Amino acid sequence: MIKALEPFKNNPCYASLSLSWKEGIAASIMQAPVDEYLIPLGLFLGATPMDIGFLVAVPHLLGSISQFFAVRAVELAGSRLKFLVRASILQALFLVPVLFLPLFVFPSRILILIAFVTLFRILANLIATVWGGLTSDYLAPEERGKYFGWRSRVTGIAGMATTITGGVLLNAFKSFWTAAGFAILFGITAAARFVSSGLMYRMQDLPEQKKPEDTFTFFMFLRAFKKSNFVKFVFYVASITFATLLAAPYFSVYMLRDLHFSYLTYMFIHMGAIVASLVSFPIWGKHADRIGNARVLKTTSLLIPVIPILWLVSSNVFYLFAIEVFAGFVWGGFNLCVLNFIYDAVSPGKRVRCLGYFGFINGVATFIGAGLGGYLAERLPMLQGSRILTLFVISGALRFFSHFLLSGQFHEVRATVQNASSVELVFSVVGIRPLFGKERNWGLLSFLKRSLWKD
């Protein structure tokens, strides 16, 4: 893995880049249980679909509101790095009470879980905003796709290992004390965050380069919608987030409650998305560096609407695993290029503020989507015996609408990118027809051949 850092050895922030991937591993070990097993924990505590909606929606809403205070939080801390270290320690402390919730039975456990997850999400959103501003300053624009693609792959492996551990752990404890399995799993998350904060402490703290025009209010930001390429991009992402979160929390509910899958089967299906995203990050990153982030975003957002519709075809475990593989590959490209587009489109002095505004709008979209999804999940007419499947259809239709309405409203910001259509990009990513001459090792088929048929 260290060899992957060789292209950056002349970067003045090389030491921080080498620490960043290690910190990312610890952070991923912390984040994976929250992403994959928070809803199963809520169901174990007796949550209804509406409760699950609140568990997802409320933390994201309040977390998004906190984005308005990101700049002020950095100013109070004294620097971006000082804020990151202190906030990550505090975030780890908020995880500690969560591990005790499954061990004790009392009426308000769901409310307490929502409260502590909300505090966790508030800090998570602030940390992500400030971390993105600092780390992007370590890299030149042409380096970001390659570095973040590689880093995402490394941290994704750590998240995958943690997800597997969680599934095996919960399945092992299910026969005699499931609560202890959840307690151990969320104890691991808190410990990993403490390790992450220690690694962050050793990173380089770069001063922010600000100009008078870098300060502007949220309403000034919104008023720029008609002429600002970046603001149009923000609403494009937020619309897809809303349509996605309408259904996203309820895939877990559908598997665990409606299909009665075990924790091990649940983990196996989720692994499809995790493994596919690991494979996809460097592939999408290399293509984005050549043809731009906007083309990757527009291509993947055309494929994203298909994902929930495919869940209607069958409930076979191996079929659902295959769907998750497709989903992980597509979402890997979308998520990677969302951040890279922001880093390209926004100057360093405006980055924390714009990341904050982006986080707020996206958080509101998450809140409305997840909350509305929780309401509809108990009231929609049934499809193939499940109301949640009806919700999947609505989510897919809205994702298509978001893509066709808004994907053409923003454009690439890099001046030195090569032209390619979405069809050409898909063929190149898969490995059927490379876009750039003889460079035939960029695609999925090439990756599989190198992995499975090594000499």
Image: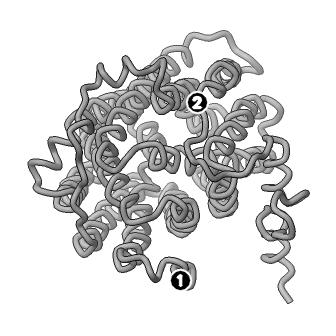
Spatial separation of the CA atoms under disc 2 and disc 1: 34 Å
In front: 427, or 413? 413
Position of 258 relative to 404 (above/below): below
Q: Quadrant of the C terminus?
A: bottom right
Q: Which residue is at 51% across, 61% downward?
A: 144
Residue 208 seen in render = yes
Q: Which residue is at 81% across, 69% downward?
A: 439
Q: Residue furthest right?
A: 432
Does residue 148 appear to the left or right of 66 in the view shown? Answer: right
Q: Nearer the viewer, mark 2 or mark 1?
A: 2
Residue 271 seen in render = no
**Coloured how?**
one colour
Classify mark 1: residues with Cα within 10 Å, few (<14), some (14-19) or many (20+): few
Q: Which residue is mark 2?
A: 410
Does residue 189 appear to the left or right of 332 in the view shown? Answer: left
In front: 26, or 384? 26
Q: In which image quadrant can residue 121 be found?
A: top left
Residue type for callout 1: Glu
Position of 146 relative to 387 (above/below): below
Q: Which residue is mark 1?
A: 6
Q: Which residue is at 67% across, 10% downward?
A: 381
Measured from the top left, where is residue 390 in percent x and y?
A: 68, 18
Position of 312 relative to 214 (above/below): above
Q: Earlier in the sequence, mark 2 or mark 1?
A: 1
Q: Residue furthest bottom?
A: 455
Q: Quadrant of the N terminus?
A: bottom right
- Circle 2: element type: loop
Measured from the top left, where is residue 97 in percent x and y?
A: 22, 50
Measured from the top left, where is residue 15 in percent x and y?
A: 35, 80
Does residue 235 appear to the left or right of 64 in the view shown? Answer: right
In front: 172, or 8? 8
Residue type for callout 2: Phe
